Image (spheres, rainbow, N blue to C red):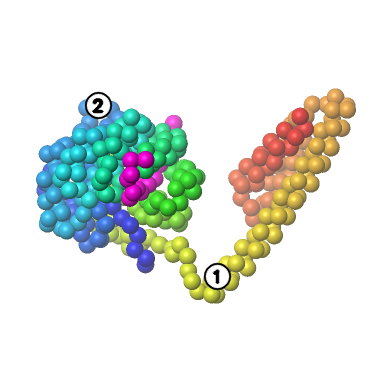
């Protein structure tokens, strides 16, 4: 298995012994960095807000004892200064902070001149421009080693996830900054330790470069994010079960087969576009006839008929109902618009 980049450790630093026991148990899995939140940005007051600077020597002790590099979340200038002075190996900007350009600017200024790697989590709002802006602010202050953490986006109402993965947002960010490493934080997407492994697998299937996973020696007693933290044993089992695909391969046979299949796909794509263009032409013609006879554009019974026909044909060809339905909804929308 190819090795992936990993950050593992508890949501929060709670005590020296919790950190040491967790790190010792994780050492076997060789994470690239050991994480723990010192300052916890909590959505509601009254929750555990972290041990703050008091936990810095505990993290240093973890590094001394286990040899693991250490990282934490920073949310303002004071945090950055304290961590740089303490020799942290990596810092990250949390989802709530990424939403705030004033704080990001303050952090970027405080980081100036340092070569520490800095990861930026996606904002805790569905606005990826804020994510891009945070990265641009760091770049403008000369920060060179920048990474991205996809931790999902909040959504209204009950969903399967604590934060919806919205993979397309990760893909957009990926194309905006193709040179930056992007890892997934399946813990904050899941909110539930039972579904962390499947989200981790999905992120690797989509080509992300690694994982940040919350692990606690005793998740049931964690002071924050109790439900989503894995035990170090469960983390090790998850890594062993992950299928890490290579992003590319050199073998001639592989390349030849892939390039043949890709050209076949291109042929079908052209045919699809061609058929859509012809369909649209007919649809415009229908529009003209309706106008001549002063008939409304949208005739629901005809629309039902088209959809039913498409679903039936799709079923016989093994296409999913959901796919056919959304495809024809789009086609119908474009075709109705062309008749205006
Ligand atoms: C965390 O990593 O513990 C954390 C607070 O995450 P996020 O900023 O993604 O909510
Ligand atoms: Mn957390």
Which of the two residues, 90 or 309, is positioned nearer the viewer here? 90
Q: Residue at x 12, y 39 (%)?
A: 54
- Secondary structure, magenta segment, majority class: loop
Instruction: Residue 269: say if magenta.
Output: no
Q: Residue at x 46, y 54 (%)?
A: 206
**Which of the 4 quarters of the picture holds residue 125?**
top left
Which of the two residues, 266 or 242, is positioned nearer the viewer here? 266
- 295 shown above or below 189: above
Of marks 1 and 2, the one in the foreground = 1
Query: What percent of the width, then of the height, locates residue 259?
Result: 60, 67
Q: Residue at x 74, y 41 (%)?
A: 306
* Left or right placement of residue 160 versus residue 81 in this view: right
Q: Quadrant of the C terminus?
A: top right
Q: Dots 1 and 2: beta carbons under 8 Å? A: no
Q: Is residue 323 visible?
A: yes
Per the rendered image, the range of residues in magenta is: 140-160
Instruction: Residue under label 1, please give it.
Output: 255
């Amino acid at each position: 298995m190819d090795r992936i980049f990993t950050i593992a450790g508890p949501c929060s630093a709670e005590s020296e012994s919790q950190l040491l026991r967790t790190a010792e148990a994780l050492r076997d899995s060789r994470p690239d960095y050991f994480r723990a939140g010192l300052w916890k940005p909590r959505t509601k007051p009254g929750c555990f807000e972290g041990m703050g600077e008091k936990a810095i020597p505990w993290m240093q002790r973890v590094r001394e004892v286990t040899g693991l590099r250490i990282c934490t979340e920073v949310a303002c200038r004071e945090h950055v200064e304290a961590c740089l002075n303490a020799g942290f190996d990596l810092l990250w900007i949390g989802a709530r902070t990424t939403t705030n350009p004033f704080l990001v600017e303050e952090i970027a200024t405080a980081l100036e001149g340092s070569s520490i790697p800095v990861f930026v989590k996606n904002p805790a709002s569905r606005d990826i421009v804020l994510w891009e802006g945070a990265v641009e602010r760091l770049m403008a202050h000369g920060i060179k080693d920048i990474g991205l953490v996809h931790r999902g986006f909040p959504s209204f109402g009950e969903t399967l996830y604590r934060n919806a993965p919205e993979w397309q947002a990760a893909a957009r960010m990926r194309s905006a900054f193709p040179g930056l490493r992007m890892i997934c934080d399946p813990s904050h997407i899941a909110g539930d330790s039972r579904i962390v492994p499947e989200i981790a697998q999905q992120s690797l299937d989509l080509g992300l470069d690694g994982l940040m996973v919350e692990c606690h020696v005793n998740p049931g007693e964690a002071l924050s994010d109790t439900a989503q933290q894995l035990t170090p044993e469960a983390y090790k089992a998850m890594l062993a079960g992950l299928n890490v695909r290579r992003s590319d391969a050199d073998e001639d046979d592989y390349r030849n087969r892939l390039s043949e299949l890709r050209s076949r796909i291109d042929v079908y794509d052209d045919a699809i576009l061609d058929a859509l263009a012809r369909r649209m032409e007919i649809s415009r013609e229908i529009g003209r006839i309706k106008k001549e006879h002063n008939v409304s554009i949208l005739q629901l019974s005809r629309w039902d008929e088209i959809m039913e026909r498409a679903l039936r044909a799709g079923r016989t060809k093994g296409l999913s109902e959901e796919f056919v339905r959304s495809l024809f909804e789009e086609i119908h929308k474009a075709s109705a618009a062309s008749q205006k």
